Image (cartoon, rainbow, N blue to C red):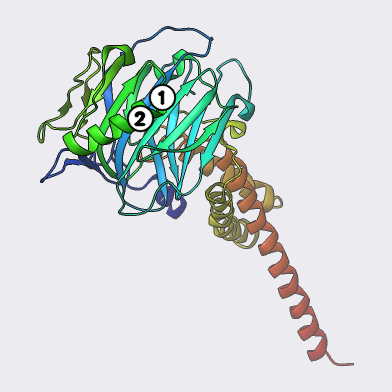
């Protein structure tokens, strides 16, 4: 019961933690906050690298991070996404026809975010790679990180992932999307325009398809002031657009501290279950296969949690936990067996000491 409670709490979709800023344009996103477009940003669906640029005015709430922005379409869920990873900026994209974790490509840019500091990011990609500017100044050009035109199209999700919870708490004050590459002088001109006037100073050659000023100050709609009709809307309850059901462990795997911390937590969390059930079936029920029965129960409890988590947007449903929880249950069985062996040995020694020679 305790394992089920910890795995499924709070048992319902929480309220969407998105509010308008009071004294300026922008949205404040909390720990369970998301904004998404009703329609899709359209572009040329092609595998040929095509220019794409994004401008973001934002202020993170902490140094942990999450998914700031992502594009999503069912045929290729791994489109361009923008992440805060501690104080670093991380960009990710991939190909739908490549199996396993190798289909993802990632690039990191160090020391972009600081808690409480507003930043203006420009991400622009072309035939030479992807360049990132911070407050109008070039940080780095990643020549090996290239995007196809489809990566900057699809439904737009702000403040969260498309298929699992990865919320980004902070303030978002401006967003612009272009189907063109922005040169360094243009980036600086846009940054100055955003800083002075609160919006981009773009011309027709830059092919702006998304402009979100967050100037509505109320309501559930964020209007797109560019040519596209892909307005954003704010759901009443926290929602994951296309939540993954039992995500394969090879897709969940990543070399990060948070991943391995969750692995350890899920193993340790099921040790008491294995210990208690094995004790019951061994000492009360007198089962000959108490360990096997306990491990099966641990797996069944874990599977029940993961299946039910598929219906809770604040939880992730994956297969990695099936292995880690079952391992934790088995370690509980081993721990009980070791304790019982020591107890039996001590009892025999005490009986031998009490017996007459």
- The image quarter in which residue 179 lies: top left
Which residue occupies the foreground of this view, 277 or 236?
236
In this figure, which residue is indicated by the disc labeled 2? Answer: 187
Q: Is residue 323 above or below residue 176?
A: below
Instruction: Say what secondary structure mark 2 lies in.
Output: helix
Asked if the residue under mark 1 is in contact with the one under mark 2, i.e. CB atoms within 8 Å, the reply is yes
Q: Position of residue 56 (x, y in %)?
A: 32, 34
* Left or right: 172, with 330 as reference point: left
In this figure, which residue is indicated by the disc labeled 1? Answer: 183
Q: Is residue 71 above or below residue 307?
A: above
**Quadrant where the C terminus is found in the figure:** bottom right
Instruction: Say what secondary structure mark 1 lies in.
Output: loop
Q: Position of residue 270 (x, y in %)?
A: 56, 54
Which residue occupies the foreground of this view, 6 or 118?
118
- CA gap between label 2 and label 1 equals 6 Å
The label on residue 19 is none
In this rendering, the count of numbered labels is 2
Residue at point 64% right, 27% down? 102
* Left or right: 217, with 151 as reference point: left
* Left or right: 37, with 251 as reference point: left
């Amino acid at each position: 019961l305790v394992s089920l409670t910890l795995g499924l709490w709070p048992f319902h979709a929480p309220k969407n933690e998105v509010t308008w800023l009071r004294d300026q344009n922008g949205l404040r996103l909390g720990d369970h906050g998301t904004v998404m477009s009703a329609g899709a940003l359209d572009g040329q669906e092609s595998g040929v690298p095509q220019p794409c640029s994004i401008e973001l005015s934002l202020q993170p709430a902490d140094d942990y991070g999450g998914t700031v922005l992502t594009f999503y379409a069912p045929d290729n869920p791994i489109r361009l996404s923008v992440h805060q990873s501690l104080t670093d900026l991380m960009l990710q994209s991939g190909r739908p026809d490549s199996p396993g974790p190798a289909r993802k490509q990632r690039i990191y840019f160090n020391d972009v975010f600081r808690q409480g500091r507003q930043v203006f990011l420009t991400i622009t990609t072309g035939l030479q790679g992807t360049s990132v500017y911070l407050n109008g100044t070039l940080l780095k050009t990643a020549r090996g990180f290239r995007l196809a035109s489809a990566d900057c199209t699809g439904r737009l999700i702000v403040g969260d992932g498309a298929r699992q919870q990865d919320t980004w708490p902070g303030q978002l004050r401006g967003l612009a999307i272009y189907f063109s590459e922005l040169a360094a002088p243009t980036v600086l001109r846009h940054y100055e325009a955003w800083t002075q006037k609160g919006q981009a100073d773009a011309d027709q050659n830059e092919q702006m398809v998304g402009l979100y000023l967050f100037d509505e100050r109320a309501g559930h709609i964020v209007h797109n002031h560019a040519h596209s009709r892909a307005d954003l809307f704010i759901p009443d309850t926290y929602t994951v657009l296309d939540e993954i059901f039992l995500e394969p462990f090879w897709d969940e795997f990543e070399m990060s501290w948070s991943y391995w911390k969750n692995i350890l937590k899920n193993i340790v969390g099921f040790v008491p279950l294995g210990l208690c059930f094995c004790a019951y079936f061994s000492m009360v029920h007198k089962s000959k296969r108490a360990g096997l029965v306990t491990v099966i129960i641990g797996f069944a409890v874990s599977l029940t949690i993961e299946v039910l988590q598929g219906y809770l947007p604040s939880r992730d449903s994956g297969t990695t936990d099936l292995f880690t929880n079952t391992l934790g249950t088995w370690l509980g069985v081993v721990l009980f067996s070791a304790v019982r062996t020591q107890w039996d040995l001590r009892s025999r020694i005490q009986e031998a000491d009490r017996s007459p020679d």
